[in-house]
Image: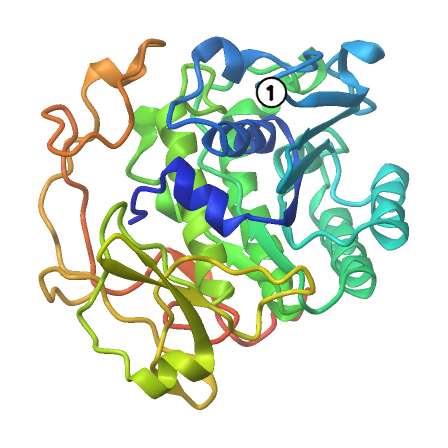
Amino acid sequence: MAGTVLKHQANQLLHNKFVVILGDSIQRSVYKDLVLILQKDAYLSSSQLRSKGEFSFEKDTLVEGGRLASMNNGTAYREVRQYRSDHHLVRFYFVTRIFSHYMESILADFERGIKPDLVIVNSCVWDVSRYGRNWDSEYRANLNKFFRQLKAVLPEESLIVWNMAMPLGKRIVGGFLVPEIQDKGPSLRFDVIEANFYGATLADDFGFDVLDMHFQFRFSLHLRTNDGIHWNAVAHRKITCLLLEHAAQAWGVELSSPGELKTDHAVPQSHIQQTSSSSLVGNKQVLFSTGSHSDQRRFKVPMQPVNHYNNGGIVYRHPPGPAFRQGQLMGQYNGFAPIFYRDDLPPPFTPGHPNLSAAPYWPVNNFVMKQRNRRPYNPYPRQKPRHL
């Protein structure tokens, strides 16, 4: 279960980082929520979630497509957005197919320009619905082409995260579902599950990280909107927290609670001098990790360094909590109260908020399917299917 990530934590984690998000309208909302959390602790409004192609969103810029061109629901629709501050660069590309001539032009931009530090990508629903009924073989071939070229273009230091598609509803109402394919609506949710398996398996084979959003939100269907496809602001903040927590683990840093210094494990003075620099804030010592993932721009995050290693891999401490075994029933999850469905959402992550119920919790990190250093959870078989 994802924790809460606040503005100052997101700013520290993504300081001097170039983030690229590729995908459909859900990925666009992922981009918007990330841009928002870099500026304020607030949720997206319903109008912000529904809007597309606008000239500006929260101080970002529409670079290409959208209202600068033709607004439509076709497969040729383009939208490129970018948010830039003194220390952050976030870019979004709207794509309707995982590999195409347009995707090749995007990869060419990566090859010629600045290499992104973090790439968050998913393309699934359009691929399985708008390019023919026998989509599976072509989708697998396009996944292979995309992953192969992406790995060739980006350096090994770039963190690439494949976001699995989220659960669809039984009844789907969406702009991409044109009248010609309306009959595919009831079965599309099953096609997405199959496509998720192909995408996750191939991404894992190429050495990329995978976040199983379908698994994460299987019991959070109350956060899905009435169109059966998109999700509300609370769901997208949870997605942002999952992504940022995974990036922090991959980069070897730990997101500490706001205003709290974790001291459950004493750090030897020799280890502090060798692996980190420190500064004093008030009466507390804030540690800055200087691990192997620091890039040429000297990325330093004010978080506690990890000081336990096992065969070269980082071993993360379990958060405090009951030592339940994985898979043990944790009780009924009541979800969020109706107040979270309105546009005037309350300030996020208020301690002791009466309308926020506790979610199921396991002491292990079971929301990451594959980590860069170790794999505590991987639901997919290691044997490669013959048809791949």
Q: Residue at x 47, y 16 (%)?
A: 227
Q: Where is residue 192 in the image (x, y as percent from the top left)?
A: 55, 40
Residue 214 visible in the snapshot? no
Q: Is residue 23 left or right of residue 246?
A: right
Q: In this view, does 100 lie above or below 270?
A: above
Residue 117, position as x, y percentages in the image:
66, 55
**Identity, as a three-letter code, of the amino acid under mark 1:** Asp
Location of mark 1 (residue): 183
Residue furthest out toward the bottom: 311
Q: In percent of the image, x 64 and y 33: which residue is there? A: 85
Position of 304 relative to 338 (above/below): below
Q: Residue at x 67, y 67 (%)?
A: 157
* 66 up-or-down from 294: above or below: above
Q: How many labels does the image show?
A: 1
Tell me where residue 191 sits by quadrant.
top right
Q: Where is residue 34 in the image (x, y as percent from the top left)?
A: 52, 34
Quadrant where the image shows the C terminus? bottom right
Q: Residue at x 67, y 59 (%)?
A: 297
Choose between 253 and 381: the one closer to the eye. 253
User: Taking 356 as reference, is 241 left or right?
Assistant: right
Secondary structure under badge 1? helix
Quarter of the image for residue 71 reads: top right
Quick one: label 1, few (<14), some, or many (20+) residues within 10 Å? few
| Of the pair 122 and 141, the residue shown nearer to us | 122
Nearest the eye: 141 or 60: 60
Q: Measured along the vertical axis of the image, is residue 227 above or below residue 217?
A: above
The coloring applied to the image is rainbow
Residue 70 visible, this orientation? yes
Give residue 36's position: percent from left, percent from top.
49, 27
